Amino acid sequence: MAEKTNRTGLWIIGAWGGVATTALVGLLNLQKKLVQPVGLTTELPEFSDIEMPAWSEFVPAGYEIRDFSFEKAANELIEQRAMERSAVTPILKELAELDTRIFPGFLANSGKVVENMADRKREENLTPRETISAMQSDMKTFVAENQLSHLIVVNLMSTEPVCEYFSESEIEKLPEAEQIKRGREWNNWEAFRQLLDSSEKPPVPASTLYAVAALETGFDFVNFTPSLGATPPALEQLAKQTSARFFGNDGKTGETLMKSVLAPMFAHRNLRVMSWVGHNIFGNRDGVVLDDPHNKATKVTSKNHLLEQILGYAPQTLVTIEYIKSMGDWKTAWDHIHFQGFLGTPMTLQFTWQGCDSLLAAPLVLDLVRLTELARRRNFTGRMDFLASFFKSPIRVEEQSFVRQFEKLEDWLRDEKQFQN
Ligand SMILES: NC(=O)c1ccc[n+]([C@@H]2O[C@H](COP(=O)([O-])OP(=O)(O)OC[C@H]3O[C@@H](n4cnc5c(N)ncnc54)[C@H](O)[C@@H]3O)[C@@H](O)[C@H]2O)c1
């Protein structure tokens, strides 16, 4: 049964980034009832009879590795035409207060570009276990001091490079016994915990340390980025043990959203897609990070895999992501789809998507937080498959069609019992 009143902490990692700032500006505007809820799935008329957690029940805080502030971050977004000044002026006092609840974050296998940006990071040379304990202490203190009933940790930080320790190409080079050991660590929480507790240096990226810190404490973890986060099945076991919830990865906001809508159309009409090329250009800080080939590889994989899953075969694909500074937070994606029609005749569909990255992402973040809290109030624990429509790479979910994924969300909202795993 849903609780009547509640205050839930919202712990944002990468708090002064573009998506995080836009989400928090949005949350404060919603709390003050200063904006219409356009772009929010949880505000759809079809869900108006469902008792959603109120926007006023969320209390934000978080981590950041750059010395910045919400006002500076909002000014950057205003300069890039990502939001109007009128959305920020009425909440400047609240944003300044929120700055005091943003703590220095932790780095681990974050890649050179991110390391070079960091001027506010925490103590280095901690073991993975010491890092996790420090994170847990920060989160628990915040919950206790603010008398919160729970905490949802949302990863909105820069994309990390592919995790070498668990990457398939690296594992294949190892002797068989070591491969088996890695497999056990990936799949079993006890083995994963021993790996973390016995390592001097983190074998996994910061996103996974943050995820362990949250889930081990019984707090929820949502990964809006393509980084590793809570992907290993070992962390699913952990979440079940502590009755926490988790999901990810990588918010589905633009070009990949279009792919997951259009590819089922080609499949249902039995039109054979021969190639799908997508060129993306944008110029925000995320673009700077993704300009590094190590960080970019994580994103390209996340944007590319779903076509084969939807179509049932692998057309030739190409995804490019290029940093073009003058574009700021505005992204242009140009997709060229070459397909075969009846009698083998080739045809083409092209589309151009021009969207503001942070504005597309922010409402999804707020919906995810609200639905995660609703899941807790409904006593759901573990992997939240019903949130698949929000992600490019929903963890261990086969279904990639946006419409089918959205139907799962509708089903869960109407009849949650069938989904308890
Ligand atoms: N449409 C979208 O914008 C969209 C869609 C899907 C996923 N994402 C992902 O969301 C993330 C955020 O995107 P953004 O545009 O806000 O990027 P951003 O660069 O503006 O923000 C990321 C923030 O994370 C901080 N950070 C980096 N490493 C950290 C660490 N270890 N601990 C704490 N803070 C850390 C950075 O200082 C920065 O402020 C990216 O990973 C991006 O790929 C964005």
Image (tube, helix red, strand yellow):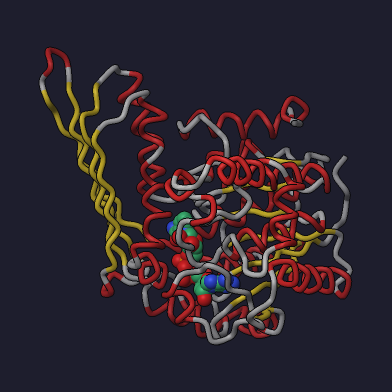
Q: Nearer the viewer, residue 80 or 107?
A: 107
Q: Which residue lies at the image location 31% right of the left edge and 30% below the top edge? A: 314
Residue 405 falls left or right of residue 338: right
Q: Which residue lies at the image location 41% right of the left edge and 61% below the top edge? A: 357
Please determine whether, in this image, residue 14 is positioned above or below residue 215: below
Residue 323 falls left or right of residue 77: left
Residue 10 in the image: state x and y as whole percent.
71, 64
Q: Which residue lies at the image location 69% right of the left edge and 67% below the top edge? A: 128
Q: Which of 241 and 77 is in front in this view?
A: 241
* Residue 5 lies in quadrant: bottom right
Residue 51 falls left or right of residue 328: right
Q: Which residue lies at the image location 52% right of the left edge and 53% below the top edge? A: 38
Q: Which residue lies furthest to the top in this view?
A: 343
Please determine whether, in this image, residue 27 is positioned above or below residue 382: below
Q: How many marks?
A: 0
Q: Is residue 359 visible?
A: no
Residue 165 in the image: state x and y as whole percent.
53, 55
Please determine whether, in this image, residue 395 is positioned above or below residue 193: above
Quadrant of the rendering where the N terminus is positioned: top right
* Residue 37 lies in quadrant: bottom right
Quadrant of the rendering where the C terminus is positioned: top right
Q: Nearer the viewer, residue 302 or 28?
A: 302
Residue 121 in the image: state x and y as whole percent.
60, 82
Residue 390 in the image: state x and y as whole percent.
53, 45
Q: Is residue 201 visible?
A: yes
* Residue 270 lies in quadrant: top left
